[in-house]
Image (cartoon, rainbow, N blue to C red):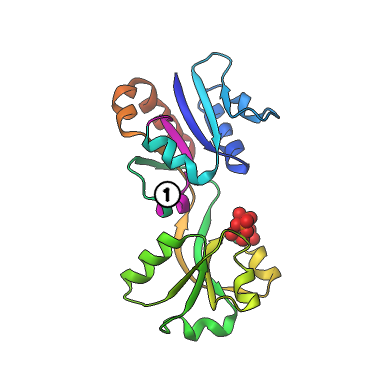
Amino acid sequence: MITVALAKGRLANESAELFEKCGIDASVVFSDTRKLVLESADKKFSFFLVKPSDVPTYVEYGIADMGIVGKDTLLEHEKDLYEMLDLKFEPCKLCVAGYPEKKELLTNPHLRVATKYVHTARKLYAGRGEDVEIIPLNGSIELAPVTGLSDVIFDVVQTGSTLRANGLVVLEEVFDVSARLVVNKVSLKRKADVILPIIDRMKAIVG
Ligand code: PRP
């Protein structure tokens, strides 16, 4: 049996569609259930539905042989696993955003940056030698500059509608992030006969 960790929500459905295109029965993922372990009818695959940030953990420990998760999550959690493929769905950008007039302040010392990507932001600014204040938040990040909690935010932008609705703009695009196929290092060797053909099929589908 191959175990697969999927990020709950929209990404899980798109991931299941990709497995189906590869000839793998992932229909169980579409079922309306509170169950967290979902086995395919032929018992060859077992899908775990977890929070996006937990997908790399399940894969690193080998509880899941493989997983699908956003590159933003992989950057933030830096787990010991193989990133095999850019699946090109859920394309987003990790951006610095804020009010347009903050553009000139981006390199100011002590710039206050609100984010849920604390590790990635620290690494980014440390790499640039910029001394900023990172303000960790868990959601609704756009509220921080609107209320004056921060000067700017470092967050994922997909359609841009949350920024627009709050009068904010992208000030700098930093990373392209999209869904990635990740594989446990031991599983790739032990279950190569099953996993490698799946990777090949996915590669052919996503181009
Ligand atoms: C994410 C992100 C932005 C929004 C971007 O938040 O933090 O707020 O989506 O998407 P958009 O560019 O299409 O508007 P999410 O919806 O995951 O919720 P959160 O605020 O609780 O983090």
The segment highlighted magenta reads: 62-75
Q: Is residue 122 above or below residue 176?
A: below
Image quadrant in which you'd find residue 193: top left
Is ligand 1 within 8 Å of the beta carbon of the residue shown at mark 1?
Answer: no
**Residue 199 spot, x, y in % from top left:** 40, 32
Q: Is residue 70 above or below residue 37?
A: below
Ligand 1 falls in quadrant: bottom right
Q: Quadrant of the N terminus?
A: top left
**Residue 80 spot, x, y in % from top left:** 32, 42
**Nearest to the observer: residue 48 or residue 29:** 48
Identified at 48% across, 42% down, the residue is: 54
Q: Is residue 154 visible?
A: yes
Identified at 49% across, 72% down, the residue is: 113
**Nearest to the observer: residue 170 or residue 153:** 153
Q: Amino acid at mark 1?
A: Leu
Identified at 53% across, 28% down, the residue is: 47
Image quadrant in which you'd find residue 41: top right
Image quadrant in which you'd find residue 133: bottom left
Left or right of residue 5, residue 10 in this image? right
Is residue 108 part of the magenta span, yes or no?
A: no
**Residue 38 spot, x, y in % from top left:** 58, 24
Left or right of residue 196, residue 69 in this image? right
Mark 1 lies on residue: 74
Q: Quadrant of the C terminus?
A: top left
**Residue 116 spot, x, y in % from top left:** 52, 60
* Label 1 neighbour load within 10 Å: few <14, some 14-19, many 20+: many
Is residue 63 part of the magenta span, yes or no?
A: yes
**Nearest to the observer: residue 65 or residue 174:** 65
Q: Is residue 158 above or below residue 203?
A: below
Residue reaching furthest to the top: 42
Of helix, strand and loop, which one carries label 1? helix
